[in-house]
Amino acid sequence: MININNNNNDFIIQVNPVIDYGMRGLCRKPYYNHPKGCPNFRKREDCPPFAPLFDKYIDMSKPIYAIYNIFDYKGHIEKMKLKHPNWSEHQLKCVLYWQGTARKQLKEKCKVFLKEHEKLKYEIITCPEAMGVNLTETMKNVGIILEWPPVNITYQIAIAGIKK
């Protein structure tokens, strides 16, 4: 297992978001059991095409932060193999069995950030890709390389900015 320090403040970093409206198209990319892409596309207001464009919604002249969580993906799969030795590779990696825990960890980090910055009225965006942010390039610019697809660790990333 990977030793991951979960101190909330270690997972907040100022970033310069890389805007690429093509990221919004990821929502329509087919994936396992979803040939038309994400089922939330055209249904939720924080999903394309309803989600606002990041640089039209957030003041890019003010500091913007990535709040991120690191989840031990490989360790999770190893635990699941022991618990369910007959499961397929797809079942072992299924987001249903790890994503809730990882999102809960990210949510706690976001609460810490908002408490520390409450006077500045930051807004947390939990799906920045839907607003046209390229998270892979944004994080690479601050020295964090995202594994895609994940093998060892996976990141959940929220962006905090001040609304225009």
Image: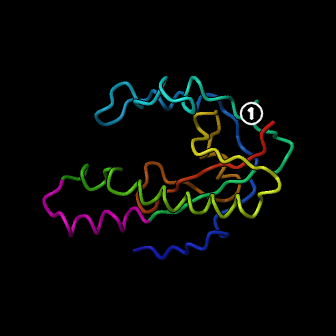
**Residue 123, above or below 55:** below
Magenta span contains residue 81: yes
Identify the residue at image location x=28%, y=34%.
33
Q: Give percent across and percent down for residue 129.
A: 59, 38
Residue occupying the far left of the picture: 86
**Residue 164, above or below 66:** above
Q: Is 11 on the left or on the right of 14, as rendered?
A: left
How many residues crowd mark 1 within 10 Å: few (<14), some (14–19), many (20+)? some
Q: Main secondary structure of the magenta part?
A: helix
Identify the residue at image location x=24%, y=51%.
91
Quadrant containing the C terminus in the rendered view:
top right
Q: Give percent across and percent down for residue 122.
A: 75, 49
State which region is magenta: 72-87
Q: Secondary structure at mark 1?
A: helix
Q: Give percent across and percent down for residue 92.
A: 26, 56
Is the image coloured rainbow, by chain, by secondary structure, or in one colour? Answer: rainbow
> In the rendered image, which residue does mark 1 sit on?
57
Identify the residue at image location x=67%, y=59%.
143
Of 126 and 26, the residue lying toward us: 126
Magenta span contains residue 111: no
**Residue 94, above or below 59:** below
Residue 74 sits in quarter: bottom left
Q: Give percent across and percent down for residue 36.
A: 37, 24
Q: Is 129 on the left or on the right of 141, as rendered?
A: left
Quadrant containing the N terminus in the rendered view:
bottom left
How many marks the image carries: the answer is 1
Q: Is 52 on the left or on the right of 91, as rendered?
A: right
Name the amino acid, label 1: Tyr
Identify the residue at image location x=51%, y=62%.
105
